[in-house]
Amino acid sequence: MPTSTTRQILIVEDSPDTVAILQAVLQKAGYTVHTAEDGRRALEMLRQRKVDPGMAILDIQLPGMSGYELCEELQAHSDWAMIPVVFLTGSEQRENRLRAFQLGAVGFLNKPVISESLLEQVQKAFEVRRQWMESFTPEPVSEAPDPDQPEKPRASRTQPLALEQVLQRQAASTGPLPPIPARQIQARSTGPLQATSGQLRPDVQNQLPIHVPDTRTGALRAHDAVTHPTGANAGQGSFAGLVTALSDELGKEPLPGIAPETLYDQALHWAVTSGDLAAKVASYTGLPLLHAIQPEQVRLGVLPVPFCRKYQVVPFSTHDQQLAFAIPHPFLLEVNDVIRRYPGAVRYIADPALILSLFEGGEIRKPQAARTGNVPAVPTALPEMSELMDELQTRYANVVEEITTPLEAEELPELEGASASDAPMIRLVNQLIDEAYRLRASDIHIDPWEEAVLVRYRIDGNLKDMHVLKPPSLIQPMVARIKIMANLNISERRLPQDGRIVFKHFSRKGPDVDLRVATSPMNFGEKVVMRLLDKQKTTLPLEALGISARNLELYRLVLKSPYGMILHVGPTGSGKSMTLYSALNELSRPDINIMTAEDPIEYTLPRINQLQVHPEIGLTFARALRAYLRQDPDVILVGEIRDGETAHIAVEAALTGHLLLSTLHTNDAPSTLMRLLEMGIEPFMISPSVLMICAQRLVRRLCTRCREPYAATPLEKRQLGLYNDTRQTLYRPGGCEHCGGEGYYGRVGVHELMVPNERLRTALAEPGMNSEKLKRMAVFEGMTTLYWDAMDKVRQGLTSVSEALAKVQPDEFDSRPSWWQQGN
């Protein structure tokens, strides 16, 4: 049996000399020392209960599994999460300190180790463990009292909560803190951010001039410094009073079910940023507002990291080295109970985005750059955007917020101007397009709300909130300006419209991009989506699209066929068009005639005849395809097979000596054959015409500058089809300036290629055949499914497990390809 936990230390270090020094000093001080040369051996000792340490000293640079990864394993295990960790490193850099906080370490030791520093860190670690055990471990249950004996007085100290109790309290039978019914919020205040008594507190009065949120653009005008309250009642006030004050100031009742845990989920509903909401919480409670936390300010070992993550609490040191806590609001009982155990500690209100950035990424000073999960973080507007909003606020503040109200006659010449200096609305639209291009956005979404206009950009496949514009009546002139640029009917607001913008015609200095525009009538106005088509981008070679070497060889072999049909399938935004353009570019040569029918023409290619379909005048894909058959084509591209008529003509073209490429909206390759059957194509026509079906998706590519390696967990090994004893290094997103704190930069394709052979063609005509049976047969014949191609890219470090699973669904049967099982 191991000795007492209070004197046991586990050292994980691969240098025998360092181990000998540490062991000699600690044993002389009366500690029992256990050693392991790597993380795998340390975990094995813990699982076999050969050691029950009171603390652990981990070298960061360990072979196989780093000290960071080993610390994560300890934190993830309920029996080891309370073991304080001290990292052994060559240098205590700022990023190492932040990483240590994220993993729950309590200190650093620099090499070469000094005896005094070693003993000081060890003593600190054991003291931290004692505090954790007292604060988060329940006291032993006392025996039943003797009724004949007088009852002893109870201790005044609050009974500590177990860590598991703290983390699971909301899931207990009592449920989460109940929402506040509207009927219970009766004390309506008469001004912004007032206490429930209805009078503005002096400390709040002193706070209000400091934090002035610019609600027009979501920008927060405040200094990047900590401001302090002047009143004595800092931190007082009820949650109900806060909700009342916010509702009065913002003029809108909260969504049903509001509770302290969901306060910041209301930010977008109230049309404010999470930073603005944090400033209002600070003003109401009288607590100081924190704008930034430097990594060197973070205090290690004060609270267990699982607790900090759960309740978004960050212990840190102020400039005068006083212990302080950054919290989103002071209305959680669990957090207040814990902070109360640290007399003299100061509470600061911080944007949850700022707090989460310390847990999830590197050094991120401003909350706008953080990955915030379900907490909306709307970036601060550019200076020129703020100036524009001042002009627009004055111009459109009194416009009636009614979607049927026509534009004033004098507004039309203003919106039709071509110069960026003519009108603020023209400059606003141009700047949004220019900003989206610089941020690598593929789409711009302009959403009309009841209280504001929300502008979002789709970057690397994910939509991000960018600007909250007020007043909401801005949606009318914005949509009118975009319609003028796209040559659409500005008076038609009841029907969806599609158009195209050549941005160079409206901005001399802007990027050379075209925009595909789509408008739709919504509840509070017309929604606009603009797809950016960069004319400077050339088609990428097939190798750059992420097609694996196995699939690329097969794809190019089929592409050389003189006739037949090649189909690319997948949802909107899965990269089908780019792959088809790359294929056409590879086919293009002087001795063949290539003709395309597209909607829209996204990129102009040399030596290729491209036609834009216009269904409104009868120029459909089917009609264009019929015309092409009389113009001596060798290769035909049809943008999309949308109906049975187009499908029939496409199959006939493939059977009469033409190579035809097109797209379909289906989930995977086998279901495409069933989709053609549903369109009325006979099996005997599908079998000889379809050469290949390529299903594809796009997953975000990990940023190569900040991706973080780690050892695959047992669950991830099962998802990867690996044995439990297999050592597999995977990568997860980090966060740096290059990728904007996201951890991802760009996207890479995931592909599933099915080339029907004789067995599949015969099975297609069998009664009762379905896509699941076809998929099993295709896998048996050697097809690699989307899932395993995605897992291959995870194993290569191109993307993360979570990103792959978010885009690709696991197969319902064991579809591992033979090359995967062979480890190739």
Image (spheres, grey):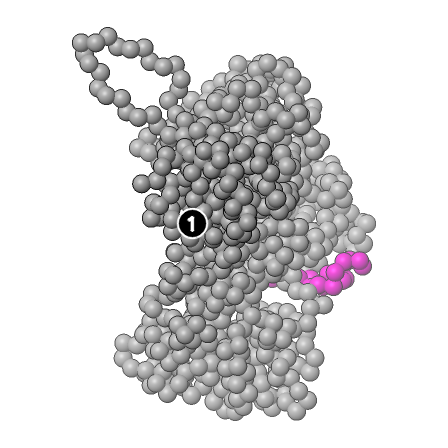
Residue 300 lies, in percent from the top left, at 55, 35
Residue 289, placed above or below residue 692 = above
- Residue 593 appears in view: yes
The residue where tag 1 is placed is 42
Splitting the image into 4 quarters, where does residue 181 fall?
top left
Report the residue that reaches farthest toward the top.
150
Queried whether the magenta region covers residue 804, the answer comes back as no
Between 411 and 433, the residue placed more toward the observer is 433
Splitting the image into 4 quarters, where does residue 585 fall?
bottom right
Residue 626 lies, in percent from the top left, at 54, 84
Left or right of 205 on screen, residue 54: left
Q: Where does the magenta region start and end?
A: 495-515
Q: Secondary structure at mark 1?
A: helix
Splitting the image into 4 quarters, where does residue 713 fall?
bottom left
Between 654 and 234, the residue placed more toward the observer is 234
Residue 641 lies, in percent from the top left, at 49, 74
- Residue sitting at 47 percent across and 32 percent down? 126
Report the residue that reaches farthest toward the left.
148
- Which amino acid is tagged 1? Ala
Residue 45, placed above or below residue 400 = below
Residue 773, placed above or below residue 53 = below
Between 563 and 67, the residue placed more toward the observer is 67
Residue 648 lies, in percent from the top left, at 45, 81
- Residue sitting at 34 percent across and 68 percent down? 814
Left or right of 705 on screen, residue 714: left
